[in-house]
Image (cartoon, grey):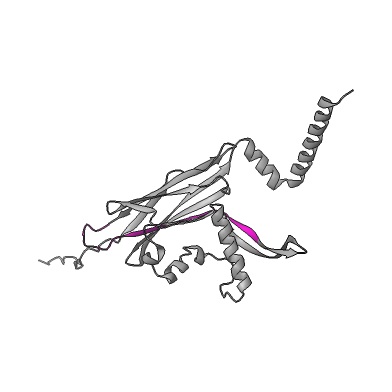
Amino acid sequence: MAATAAPAQTPQGPDEIPTERVHSDISTREIAIKSNFTGIEIVIFGAVDYAPPDPKAPPYDVIMVIRGPTQDVVARRKERFAGIWLNGSSKVFHDIPGFYAVLSSRPLRAIAPEETLNELKVGFTALDLGPDDHSSVSDDLFRQAVIRNKEERLLFQYLDNAVSFIGRSLFRGTVDMPVNVPIGVYTAEVLLFQDGKLLSKDESTLNVQKVGFERGVYILAFRHPVIYGLLAVAIALLMGLGAWALFRRD
C-alpha cells in the first residue's frame, strides 16, 4: 500500500508582541458660532492600546497639536515720521495657521529632541513662517511679531503639563477656543512618545462654522463682497433718511 505524504508543517515562531498604538477623539466635532458665542473649551482624550503592564516600563508622553485653517498674515512695522507713527516696511507670511495650540504632558524638550519636534512641526519655532536660513534680522523680527500677536489674541497657545494621564493608558487635555477663533476645519493630532521616540499618532477633525443670520452675513461678505458693500451703503442711506424723517422739525 502506498503511504500518503503528510503536508509539510511550517515551524511556528514566537508570537509577535503588538506595539503600542494611540487612539484619540474630541469632546465635540462641530462648533456653531452665533452672535452670543463667547468661546468654548474642548476636551481631547484618548487611550494607549497594547500598553505593557510592567510598572517598571518608562512612562508615556503625549503631545497634542490643534491646527486651524491657514491664512495669509501681513506683519507691518510702525515707523515714526515727522512725529507721526505710520506703517512702514511689511512682510507677508503665507499659509499661517489661524489657530495653533500645543499641549503636552511635560515640557517639549523633555519629551523629544528638537530635531524630532521640528520634523513633526511641533512648537512655535517649528512653524513654517518662510525661509529658515534666518539671514535677515528683520525677517526674524517680523516672525516674532506674528507669533506674539497671535499669542496675545489667544490664537497661538503652548501649554506644557496640560495633558494628564488617568492610570497608565488613559489621558486627556483641554484647550480654550477664544471668541475670535477663525471658522473652518481643524485637526487635532495626538502624538505618543516614550524615551524620546515617537511610537504612534492619531488625528481627529473639528469643524467650526457660523450658523443662522451670522452665517448669511459672512457668506455674503466674503463670497459676494460687491453685493455686500452695496447693501451696506443702501442700509446706511435708509437709516439716515429714516432718522431725518423721524427727528426733523417742520
Report whether residue 166 is seen. yes
Residue 6: x %, y % from top left:
16, 65
Report whether residue 29 is seen. no
Q: Is residue 209 above or below residue 55?
A: above
The region drawn magenta spans 51-74
- Which quadrant does the N terminus fall into? bottom left
- Which quadrant does the C terminus fall into? top right
**Position of residue 247 in the picture relative to residue 106 (left or right):** right
Residue 59 included in the magenta stretch of the image: yes
> In the rendered image, which quarter is residue 53 located in?
bottom left
- Identify which residue is drawn at 41% across, 63% down: 108
Q: Which residue lies most toward the front here? A: 83
Closer to us: 196 or 107: 107
- Identify which residue is drawn at 40% across, 66% down: 109
Residue 184: x %, y % from top left:
57, 49
Residue 224: x %, y % from top left:
72, 45
